[in-house]
Image: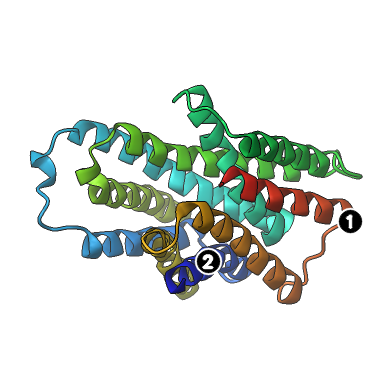
């Protein structure tokens, strides 16, 4: 249970770090660059050094998926930055978690997995909540900002789908290499954008390090938690508890406010996340 608690805390800290950095950083790409460099270093430290990566089959597939995942990782965090600035950390984080809809639908459509009744209900609830938030009062006026919630959902969901594709078709021995390559590609791309943007400030580096630590360890702690707790319990608890922590912090620390319809939609999304993960 300790690892699950640490995974929840780390996952929440990723969103909250982005929210806290808004008014302090001068080079948003620089912060993400530092974040991904730190993730790359952590991936190298914890990878199994006994595995000879280039002697394994499937190295080409791992490289292709790793490069695509690295691009998506960076793009998703950029979308998270923008959406958090305009829609708040609560709604942005909730929609990012709801991205689980994408790999769920992919599993049904591509991998021909038969959906459970709970998953079907979860998909319906999730889609209904999305429609409610995007068609509430004044939604048309804020449409250009609200649309980033959908982009964030798609970005997070497609990124998770890449990991699912690697699990299905990749060489499991290359999993550490896949993660290392993903973070390295994201770091290189962020570095190009960062130096194009201009100089890095001390705050860019500090907030990048603050973001990088939980960004890596959220995934690592979750994997360790799955060794102790059945996935059917771990994933719903992880998703819902993370949203609860972010919501409470957003309300208490950042003074964010949700409309009654958004609160109702949030409740539907929490229930949808539970149903999609069991």
Estimate the x, y position of residue 26 in percent, counting from the top left: 54, 65
Taking 236 as reference, is 134 above or below it?
Answer: above
Neighbourhood count class around disc 2 (C-alpha, 10 Å): few under 14, some 14–19, many 20 upward: many
Taking 122 as reference, is 209 above or below it?
Answer: below
Q: Which residue is mark 1?
A: 260
Q: Which residue is mark 2?
A: 8
Secondary structure found at label 1: helix
Q: Which of 136 and 206 lies nearest the eye of the viewer?
A: 136
Residue at image point 68% right, 58% down: 85
Label 1 vs 2, first from the N-terminus: 2
Residue at image point 70% right, 60% down: 90
Estimate the x, y position of residue 28 in percent, counting from the top left: 52, 59
- Dot label at residue 268: none
User: In the figure, residue 227 lies in which quadrant?
Assistant: bottom left
User: Colour scheme of this structure image?
Assistant: rainbow
Residue at image point 63% right, 59% down: 240
Taking 127 as reference, is 242 above or below it?
Answer: below
Neighbourhood count class around disc 1 (C-alpha, 10 Å): few under 14, some 14–19, many 20 upward: few
Q: Which of 118 and 87 lies nearest the eye of the viewer?
A: 118
The answer to the question of whether label 1 and label 2 lie on touching residues, with beta carbons closer than 8 A, is no
User: In the figure, residue 44 lies in which quadrant?
Assistant: bottom left
């Amino acid at each position: 249970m300790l690892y699950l608690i640490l995974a929840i805390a780390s996952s929440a800290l990723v969103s909250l770090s982005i929210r806290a950095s808004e008014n302090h950083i001068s080079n948003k790409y620089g912060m993400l660059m530092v974040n991904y460099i730190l993730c790359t270093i952590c991936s190298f430290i914890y990878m199994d050094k006994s595995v000879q990566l280039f002697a394994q089959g499937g190295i080409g597939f791992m490289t292709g998926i790793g490069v695509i995942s690295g691009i998506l990782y960076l793009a998703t965090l950029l979308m998270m930055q923008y959406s958090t600035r305009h829609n708040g950390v609560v709604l942005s984080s909730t929609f990012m978690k709801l991205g689980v809809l994408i790999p769920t639908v992919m599993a049904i459509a591509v991998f021909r997995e038969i959906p459970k009744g709970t998953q079907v209900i979860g998909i319906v609830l999730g889609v209904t909540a999305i429609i409610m938030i995007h068609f509430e009062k004044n939604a048309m006026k804020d449409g250009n900002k609200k649309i980033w919630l959908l982009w964030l959902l798609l970005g997070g969901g497609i990124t998770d789908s890449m990991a699912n594709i690697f699990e299905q078709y990749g060489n499991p021995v290359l999993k550490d290499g896949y993660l290392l390559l993903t973070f390295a590609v994201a770091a290189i791309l962020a570095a190009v954008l960062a130096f194009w943007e201009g100089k890095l400030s001390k705050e860019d580096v500090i907030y990048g390090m603050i973001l990088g630590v939980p960004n890596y360890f959220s995934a690592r702690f979750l994997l360790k938690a799955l060794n102790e707790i059945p996935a059917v319990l771990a994933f719903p608890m992880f998703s819902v508890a993370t949203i609860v922590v972010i919501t409470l912090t957003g309300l208490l620390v950042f003074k964010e406010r949700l409309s009654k319809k958004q609160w109702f939609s949030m409740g539907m999304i929490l229930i949808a996340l539970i149903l999609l993960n069991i």
